[in-house]
Image (spheres, grey):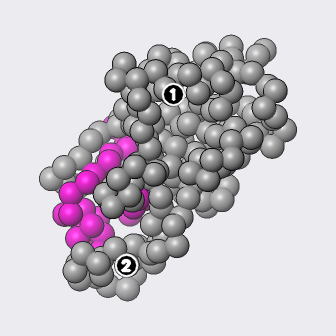
Amino acid sequence: MSIKSSMNEIIDLKNLNNCFLIAMPHIDDPNFYHSVSLICEHNEKGALGFTINRPIGILIEDIFSQMSIEFSHNQAAEKPVLSGGPVQIEQGFVIHRNVGHWQSSLDLDENIIITTSRDILTAIAKDEGPEDNIVLLGYSGWGAGQLEKEIEKNMWLISPVDPQILFDLPYEKRWEAAAKLIGIDINNLTNKIGHA
């Protein structure tokens, strides 16, 4: 069975909302090298997503300090902040499980939420927010038809989202694990393999 046909049984390639976008091994763009992105919006106007496996060298407590949010030195404060992508890198986002009610949130599905309001960070700082969370700066965006063309050029694999990969797996293991969701050992692929 070809990669294309096996993926089409799992994913509607015309609607990639709430899917993982997995960089092929030959992509050398530093923003996407060995990256896994969570696609949050995909329509005729383009696509938006967040890279979920690229720590940027600062901790959530650094964000708390910068925003003058009081916090306890807890496990949540010591988690790394991720680069969500190269667009609007000063904008913060929190991807989390569906816990609590926040001022500005987008439901991806019944389990995964994206929140942009300060109230969730304040709750996390007090150990009152969702335990499963990822704090990111920036996002990735594609113009109309751009992502589809990149898939046709063999730049990406698509897999369904697995919350365990999103929230539980170490960042350095997410790229390979996301590809395994569709039965692919990504380390065995080359840029000569087609899938779209």
Secondary element type, mark 2: helix
Residue at 42% in and 39% down: 141
Residue 113, horizontal then vertical, whole percent: 33, 46
Determine whether 60 is above or below 163 in the image. below
Q: Quarter holding the C terminus? A: top right
Residue underneath mark 1: 147
- Residue range in magenta is 110-136
Instruction: Residue 195: name its quadrant.
Output: top right
Q: Is residue 133 magenta?
A: yes
Relative to 49, is 26 on the left or the right?
A: right
Q: CA distance from mark 2 to mark 1?
A: 34 Å
Determine whether 120 is above or below 103 in the image. below
Relative to 159, is 112 on the left or the right?
A: left
Between residue 149 and residue 190, name the one nearer to us: 149
Residue at 51% in and 52% down: 52
Relative to 106, is 171 on the left or the right?
A: right
Q: Which mark is residue 98?
A: none
Residue 102, horizontal then vertical, whole percent: 19, 54
Secondary element type, mark 1: helix
**Few, some or many residues within 10 Å of mark 2 (<14, 14–19, 20+):** many
Residue 35 visible in rendering:
no
Residue underneath mark 2: 61
Residue furthest out toward the bottom: 73
Q: Amino acid at mark 2?
A: Glu
Residue at 60% in and 25% down: 151
Relative to 54, is 97 on the left or the right?
A: left
Q: Amino acid at mark 1?
A: Leu
Q: Quarter holding the N terminus? A: top right
Q: Is residue 139 magenta?
A: no
